[in-house]
Image: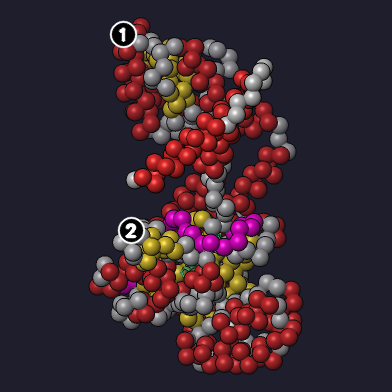
Amino acid sequence: MPRKKSTASAKKNTAKNVKKPSGKNNTADKGKKTAKAAPSAADKKSASKKKRVQTLALLRGMKDITPDHSESFVKIFRAADAIATSYGYSYVETPVVEYTSLFVRSLGKGTDVVDKEMYMFEDKDGGKVALRPEMTASVARAYIMHGMHTLPQPVKMWYWGPMFRYDRPQAGRYREFHQFGCETFGERSPVVDAELICVAYNLLRDLGVNASVHINSIGTLQEREQYIIELVGYLRSKRSYLSELSKKRITKNPLRVLDSKEPEDQAVVEEAPQIIDWLSDASKNYFMGVLEYLDEVQIPYVLTPTLVRGLDYYSDTVFEMFADDADGGSQNALVGGGRYDGLVEQLGGQSVPGCGFSFGVERVFAILEKRRRQQNSGQEEEQIAQKDRKGLFFAQLGEQASKRALYLIETLRRDGITVYHNLGKSSLKAQMELAHKHGVTHTLILGQKEVLDNTVLLRDMDSGIQEVIDQNKLKQTLKKMFNL
Ligand code: HAM
């Protein structure tokens, strides 16, 4: 290692050879030199602040759902669970990460989701994997892998979970978002399509969201292929009027030109040949069947010839739902779905038809949150706080009381009474402060004496009045008080 040595010594020599200025300023200059060689405390602080800032940053297009807003999120989940269960759908869960090929084969090359928006990476074994951009493909994979074609058909499944698309974030469009969805496998019948539309539409209605159903049929694969030849010819003849994006799509994914949002494309799209004219009588009759069922259950719909959806697996019925103007209607669909009779076979399974929808949780969440803000804006903060007050706090003093308190809290919870506490705290003052912070109307207080007497104090947090209650009658008293 002679070379290394010489470098080291050269450095040493250079350092040594630096001429130290003499006189008063010596110490100050020494300080300056030290500051250059090693980062100062201030530098270190700012570097660690930068690091912290990055560690605490969210990725673009992703967000937290914090406790102050989570109520609407949980409300949607509970309503989704309730309606899916009531229509006979069973819950299914699939991994967030899947082999990339699953999505490429099902959603299709040339689609925006596959070509531009998938989060793809290699895992440590070199496997090509992706964060799921949607769940229909995963549920179809699960249907095949678990031999669900041997079960009584149709097999009806619902799901809820995060999806990932590396899209340009904007209002209502995130890189991580949640979908609630329902999929029905094993039956091709218009009533299945209509039922799925009912589930999504009724869920929106249950959540108080007024929406319109846009619907179309894109027929079978063969019918679509014929139509695409016609469409491409037409689009080529109008190429100069189209937006740059649509020009590119003529060869890559011509159907997508039809649901272009670019203003300059609208006139061309309006005059475009309509897919319905390329459908066979069988496909038209199937579609009529779906519409008749919708009429029967009085779900209004808008026939939308330009609706083609952006994924390759669809056939026949396709639909989307949009919030009505009163609910801040926008170009963003709240729900998207349709029939996919070729998907299971395409993924290596039997020839099994399927149909389903996915519901964009964040988009509905935004409507509910906006409404909550509007409703609250007319009220005084005090009133809102009063309205939101709920539940009980349980305070205790001493070890015996703490143990007894835990038992009582458990029994109350089982009866649906929300109980806040901090059994780790021993000071009554600290516990009462916490009770105030939770905004509860009443606090239960259990001390040594109450443990021996088998009683508990119930304190009204506003008036400060306390009453003694027999522990055996606690449940009845509270149930009466809280109308449970
Ligand atoms: P999709 O139209 O891609 O269909 O998505 C369904 C819904 O998910 C949309 O209508 C929208 O509400 C929501 N969504 C999509 N992308 C985003 C985003 N970037 N940010 C926020 N929300 C978003 C599917 O995913 C199909 N799997 C639907 C389906 C199920 N077809 C048959 N079965």
Residue at image position (56%, 89%) is 228
Identify whether 421 is placed above or below 56: above
* Residue at numbered disc 1: 452
Q: Position of residue 252 (x, y in %)?
A: 56, 82
Mark 2 neighbour class, 10 Å CA radius: few under 14, some 14 to 19, many 20 or more:
few
Camera-nearest residue between 480 and 105 = 105
Segment tinted magenta in the rendering = 152-173
Q: Which tag, 2 or 1, sits closer to the chain's start?
A: 2
Residue at (42% x, 62% y) in the render: 121
- Does 372 sit left or right of 222 as displayed? right
Residue 102 visible somewhere in the drawing = yes
The residue to which callout 2 is attached is: 124
- Say which amino acid is labelled 2: Lys
Q: Nearer the viewer, residue 415 or 258?
A: 258
Q: Quadrant of the N terminus?
A: top left
- Magenta span contains residue 140: no
| Label 1 packing within 10 angstroms: few (<14), some (14-19), many (20+) | few
Gap in angstroms between the C-alphas marked 2 and 1: 62 Å
Residue 135 at x, y = what percent? 43, 64
